[in-house]
Amino acid sequence: MGAMTLARRGNLPQNDDQTTMLVRKIPDGSVIDHIAAGKALSVLRLLGNPQENGFTIAMVMNVSSSKMKRKDIVKVEGMEVSQEQVQRLALIAPRASVNIVRAYRVVAKRNAVPPRTLRGILSCTAPTCVSVREKDSAPSIFFLSGKSPLRYRCKYCGRELTEKEISSQLG
Amino acid sequence: MRGRNEPLGAELVSRDAWKGRDVISILDFSRRELESLFAAASEFVGPPKPRKDLADYIVATAFFEPSTRTRLSFTTAALRLGAKVIDLSPDVSSILKGESLHDTTMMLEGYSDLIVMRHPSEGAALLAAELASVPVVNGGDGSQHHPTQAMLDLFTVKRLKGKIDGLTYTVLGDNRYARSATSFLYGLTKFKPKMVYIVSPETLRPRDEVIKQLKGLGLRFEQRAELEQVIGNTDVLYLTRIQKERFPDPNEYEKVKGSYKLTKEVLAKGRSGMIVLHPLPRSTELPYEIDSEKSSAYMTQAHLGVPLRMALLLKVIGGGRS
């Protein structure tokens, strides 16, 4: 993994309540904010583990958030997350926002929007669903059935996948 | 066939657009279309007359699961309309060699004008319908849909009670795995029942997605634990057996086996004019002593399967090849 920049503010007492974690600004790349706490590594996997391709990663986990109580943040230096990646990101981090940074300035904001239809990405959890039993000729198809919490419904058997199930399949 | 069917414009649907359609779920049909089917089926009730409406057509039956009434009533219906019937027997076909549903469907579409399919996998008929260029009629897919059974059940209510609206229905039994019960509940959403009581042991209550669907469609229903709580208000009692073959864990079946049974004593508490329906086959929930009761209507229900399916075949195939 690339450099993870975590620091304690030197003039604060060293107890957990007053600990602040800082991550330096990146000159170019993507800042993915509002990731549910604990999902940062899953996000990296979904992005194809950019650290394995030489990109520098900065990551903070389990920080306070007014919107989400606790959240993770991922910064990928030098890599701009595509719109397609943002859509897939929505499957494990449906409230995520992505800022594209160039020369230390945010030039684009992309919100994770779950795709209405997913083909061949998720697997149905019903063992008797035709998409499971005949998977070679019937690739899975899911329709978005809820955004908050995220839910997808199998086209063939109607079974709904919960946010947790979706996350565990992709994470 | 789905490609040719979708999307159906609202105007077409409201004008009774049966011809060439797949029959996958009763939810795909409007009240008007169902009523038009019932009216056509009524014409076929009574002593059969020789007909040649479908003389140039071949109907394929492909039952990957056991069936008595659905398979035979479809076959009888096709023969009574002059059609020829070919039958795929999974136990002597290439399915034994591992042939996929995809390839089996592609063969059937080349050999026939309509496919009636029953399969243990949920969504099998929908997949077949997407593949085939001829209409596919779902004869039951796993624990999900059995649309023609539900059409038959509603037709029976219409024949015996004179109406479907305004009645109180109790659906008793395996509401989790019995596709007949699920499809009957879905069918009721097309009408205006006074009330629907869903009575089942806790582990056999309808699946979450079914409950969500029923609520979304505005069906007025309540779940109850005991038949005796509601039988006094019931006009139509719909009973299903516990679907032993669909339990993922045999121990779970053992826990609920024999957990409900219709007795003469319970039946005596029912309202005058109540009818008892059952898609059959039965198990211990419906003792033979009930057969002689005035309210028992399940044999009539089974027999009405032929006229109902005659009307359905005629509407879907259309008749008159030229």
Image: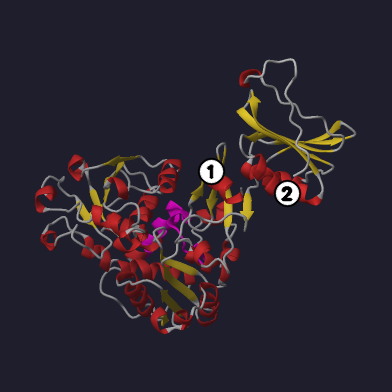
Q: Position of residue B225 (x, y in %)?
A: 24, 42
Q: Is residue B25 magenta?
A: yes
Q: Is residue B96 magenta?
A: no
Q: Give the vertical position of B173 relative to B111 (above or below).
A: above
Q: Which segment did they paint magenta?
A: B18-40
Kindly identify which residue carries mark 1. A164
Label 2 marks a residue whose chain is A
Q: Position of residue A171 (x, y in %)?
A: 61, 47
Quadrant where the C terminus of chain B sits is: bottom right
Q: Amino acid at mark 2?
A: Asn
Pick the front one: B23 or B258: B258
Q: Say few, some or many: other residues with alpha carbon within 10 Å of mark 1 (under 14 / 14 to 19 / 20 or more).
A: few
Q: Please determine if labels 2 and 1 lie on a single subunit.
A: yes
Q: Disc 2 or disc 1, which is closer to the eye?
A: 2
Q: Regarding mark 1 in the picture, which secondary structure is present there?
A: helix
Q: Position of residue B169 (x, y in %)?
A: 27, 47
Q: Residue at x 40, y 84 (%)?
A: B92
Q: Position of residue A95 (x, y in %)?
A: 65, 35
Q: Which mark is residue A49?
A: 2
Q: Give the vertical position of B143 relative to A17 (above or below).
A: below
Is residue B232 visible in the rendered image? The answer is yes
Pick the front one: B106 or A8: A8
Label 1 marks a residue whose chain is A
Report the number of numbered marks. Answer: 2
Earlier in the chain: of badge 2 and badge 1, it is 2
Quadrant where the N terminus of chain B sits is: bottom right
Pick the front one: B206 or B155: B206
Q: Amino acid at mark 1?
A: Lys
